[in-house]
Amino acid sequence: MKNNRHLVFWEMALLVASVLVFRGLWLLLDTIEWLSRPAGLWASLAVAMIAATVALAVVNRASSK
């Protein structure tokens, strides 16, 4: 039982840390003028979609083995 509590604690720490990283990255990207323009928003959306598609494909390939 102790191992499960230890694991849950570190999973919660990872969750909180990821929220802080997301917030920091969001605020950092807000300071870049080009990303506030429509072309920058579309470019960042395209890059994010490509990265998400590749990541999902790799995860699905790894989980099917």
Image (spheres, grey):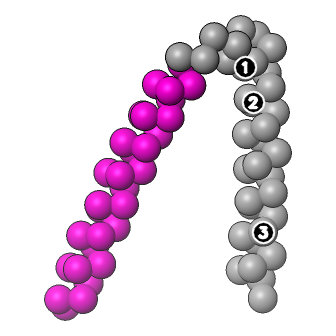
Query: On residue 64, which mark appears?
Result: none
Quarter of image, res 54: bottom right
SS under mark 3: helix
In contact (CB < 8 Å): disc 3 and disc 1: no
Q: Residue at (72%, 70%) from the top-left corner?
A: 59
Q: Is residue 23 magenta?
A: yes
Up-down relation of residue 19 to residue 33 (above or below): below
Residue type at tag 1:
Leu
Q: Position of residue 6 (x, y in %)?
A: 23, 80
Marks 3 and 1, the one that precedes in the sequence? 1
Relative placement, left or right, of 11 versus 36 is left
Give residue 50's quadrant in the image.
top right
Q: Which residue is mark 3?
A: 58
Quarter of the image that includes the N terminus: bottom left
Callout 1: SS: helix
**Residue 33 coordinates in the image, percent (x, y):** 63, 11
Q: Magenta stretch mostly in which secondary structure?
A: helix
* Spatial separation of the CA atoms under disc 2 and disc 3: 20 Å
What residue sits 37% from the left and 42% below the top? 20
Tell me if label 1 and label 2 are in contact, CB under 8 Å.
yes
Please give the range of residues in magenta. 1-30
In depth, the one of 59 and 39 nearer the eye is 39
Question: How many residues crowd around disc 1 within 10 Å: few (fewer than 14), some, or many (20 or more)?
Answer: few
Q: Which residue was labeled with disc 1? A: 41
Q: Tag 2's secondary structure?
A: helix
Q: What amino acid type is highlighted by mark number 2?
A: Leu
What residue is drawn where x is 78% and y is 37%?
Answer: 47
Q: Residues within 10 Å of mark 3 (few under 14, many from 20)?
A: few
Question: Closer to the N terminus: mark 2 or mark 3?
Answer: 2
According to the image, label 2 marks what residue? 45
Give percent across and percent down for residue 22: 47, 40
